[in-house]
Structures are given as C-alpha cells and as structure tokens.
Image: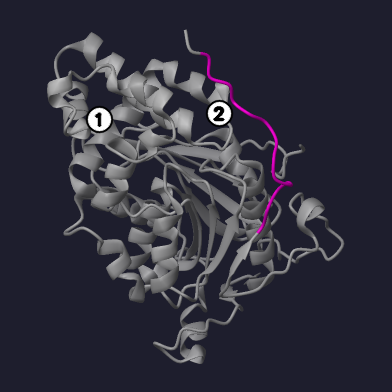
Amino acid sequence: MSSSLYPEIEPYMSGKLRVGDPHELYYEQCGNENGFPVIFLHGGPGGGCRTDDRRFFDPRFYRIILMDQRGAGRSVPTACLEDNTTWHLVDDIEALRTTLGIEKWVVFGGSWGSTLSLTYAETHPDRVVALVLRGIFTLRRSELLWFYQDGASHLFPDVWDEYLEPIPDSERGDLMSAYYRRLTGSNQEERMNCAKAWTKWECSTSKLYMDDEKIAAAENSKFALAFARIECHYFVNGGFFSYDGQIIDNLDKIRHIPTTVVQGRYDVVCPMKTCWDLHKNFPEADVIIVDDNGHASSEPGIERELVKTMDDLRADLKIDRTHVVVSRPTSHQVTPKKKVRDEFRTSFSDTPPPSTPPQRIVRDPNFESPSRRESSDDPHLKNVLHKRPLQPPGGFSHNITFG
C-alpha cells in the first residue's frame, strides 16, 4: 500500500536550545520558513523524533518544527532523568516558541505526544491555534495498569512472558516499580536488559500486525535506554500531575480550540476508552476512529487520516504578512464565537517583519494531496465520531509456534 506521507524533506535549519543544566534540546525546522507554524511533539516520553515525522505536513504551507524532548533523541544528556518532568517539557515548548519568535502555532502529537499537547494547551491555551492528536493517552493510573500490569497481557501473552522475564516472581505485583529500580540501578547489564525488554513490549504491541522492523528497534541500546528509563520515570511518578485524571478534568480550558483526534480502534497501547472519555468531556472535538488500525502513527489508515487532517486544516488557516487567522468556527459556547475568533487573530510573530516580505501562502485548488488519493470521498463531518476502515475485514494472521 502506498504511503500517504509527503516526500522526504531535510531541515532548512537545526539548533540546540539550552534549557538549564544539564539539558540541551535538539530542534529543527522544515518546509516553508514563512509558512504557518506547527510543532510536532513526539511520543514516549523518551521516544525522540523520526525523519518521517516531518512528512505529515504540506511543506509548501507549513513551517514544520520538531523538538527532541529532554533526554530523548538528539537532545543531551541521553536518558537523563534530572529535572525531567511534564512541567519542564511544557516550559521547554514555550521557550522554543519564544526563541523562534512565534506567537501561536498548531500543536500536533500522538500517544505521549497527545498527553503533552493537551497539557501544554491547558497551560497555554492562548498560544494554540489548533490541536491534532492521535492515540489519546492521559496517563491515568488505570491506563498504565492496563498496559504494564494486567490488560494488554491477555492479548499478547507470548510477548508478555518476555516482558516478565527480567523481574523475579516476588516483585511482579508492581512491575513498573520493579523495572524502575533496575532502570535506575547501578548494575549496567541489568539496566540494559530491562531497557530492551521494556521497549520490546511496546514495540511489539503498537501495530495491528506485529512489525519485525519496529520490534528490532528495541535492540538499539541508546534508543532503548532513553525510551525505557524516561517512560518508567514518568509513569511511576504519575506523570507529575497533581492528581489522577487532571487532563480530562481540565478540558473546559481548551474546548474553544479546534481539535481533531485520530484513534485506532484496536490500539492496545492507548486503548480507545481514553479517547471515548475525552470525547464525552470535549464533544466539540472531531474524532476519527480508524476501525482496522492499532496504535502507531505509521499504521496506514492513521497515517492517511493525520495527513488529511493537516491538509484540510490549511483551508481554515490563513496567512498574510502580519497576521494569522483561524477561520474555522467553534461550537463551544463558553465564550461568544466572535470573541473566540478575535482571540485567534494576532500578530504572526514577536519579531519585526523581515526586510523581504514573506511569501503569501495560498491553497492550490488543483493540488491533490497524498491523503486525498484514498479518501477524497470521505465525509468531513464536524463534532461527530466517524469510522474510517482502511480495508475489508480479514487479512494476515500471525502464527505462534510452540516449541
């Protein structure tokens, strides 16, 4: 099946942002340097950005910004847990926005990236023009126990046994804590074995059909150590939230922000229950359920819908020399619609206009985006759940061989 992503693209600039000892964050910008800004927030926490993460966005329209979060990817020091909390990351996003001279931007994130996107938006709603989310995760205790203690284990018992292997029977009543002791312990060999086992569990369960290439990524020592240590650090600390369910409770702060959610029906890592809870508390959000996909952004249907969402959003975003405008109305009545739209109208940048006027971005009516090749006849109905199957029922099977 052909990819819905835009062609590969290289950054037009990259840099390091010092956010206080010991952390220095890698960031990059791609696409149109005078385009509409969008920040991509990666998953994990600890996952880092991939080159394909640049490709969800039309590079002629968007100014695409990627940042590796503390301890992840190309940020240094790798796998560092010091001063590494949700609230440090929220501050880092604001620091980057200020550094780049951006007034407001679209925020795009999946899995843990959806957690961070929602938290950032609830903390700085005046800085978010729109939210595009995938695989909703709000880091409630019930969500963590489902995946790391008892739940997903019933669907993947073969892989679960490998996840259990590094932990003795006497400590399996609280697997996250048992892993955390080893991932932060002094035994380097044990630390690495646990990092790879933790990472392999998630890589094995993140797609509807198990993907050998994705599973093999767990053998990359640098990636596995950062991914496992940082994830486990956040999870045993409840995401550093004040109380369980904080994100859902605070959704009223952002219900005026145009929001689209893409969720795989068979997402085992971040099950649809959390997306459903968000939908009930945030009915204005446009929720798209892909009926035959799992968790990963690289799942064909999820990939297609994310690209299509960003393509459709271009019609709602207008850029001229000094202003950005969101033209999509919102149905949430906490504040009058006119006031909401006026709040979205602001100066495009904190910095003075460049000497050469930036290019005016106009949507090309004849341009056929990658996403529209497969979903041009899909209805785009607002504020309802729509289900978008990728293929007829049936397909591949995964055989288990018992030795």
**In which image quadrant can residue 384 be found?**
bottom right
**x then y, percent, for residue 154:** 39, 35
Q: Which residue is mark 1?
A: 80
Q: Which dot, 1 or 2, sits closer to the camera? A: 2
Examine the rendered structure and indicate whether residue 21 appears above or below residue 329. above
Query: Which residue occupies 38% across, 52% down?
Result: 137
**x then y, percent, for residue 226:** 33, 27
**x then y, percent, for residue 172:** 19, 27
**In which image quadrant can residue 319 be found?**
bottom right
Q: Is residue 84 visible?
A: no
Q: Is residue 187 magenta?
A: no
Please rate how many residues cluster around mark 1, counting C-alpha atoms within 10 Å: few if below 14, some from 14 to 19, many from 20. some
Q: Residue furthest right?
A: 366
Q: Which residue is mark 2?
A: 210
Between 312 and 218, the residue placed more toward the observer is 218
Magenta stretch secondary structure, dominant: loop
Query: Which residue occupies 39% across, 46% down?
Result: 112
- The span shown in magenta is 388-401
At label 1, the amino acid type is Cys
Examine the rendered structure and indicate whether residue 113 appears above or below residue 354. above
Image quarter of the N terminus? top right
Q: Residue furthest front?
A: 402
Examine the rendered structure and indicate whether residue 87 appears above or below residue 50. below
Query: Which residue occupies 38% across, 38% down?
Result: 152
Query: Which residue occupies 42% across, 72% down?
Result: 280
Q: Secondary structure at mark 1?
A: loop
Q: Is residue 58 visible?
A: yes
What is the tally of numbered marks visible in this picture?
2
Horizontal side of 256 relative to 140 (left or right) equals right
**In which image quadrant can residue 53 be found?**
top right
Between 60 and 229, the residue placed more toward the observer is 229
Examine the rendered structure and indicate whether residue 161 appears above or below residue 134. above
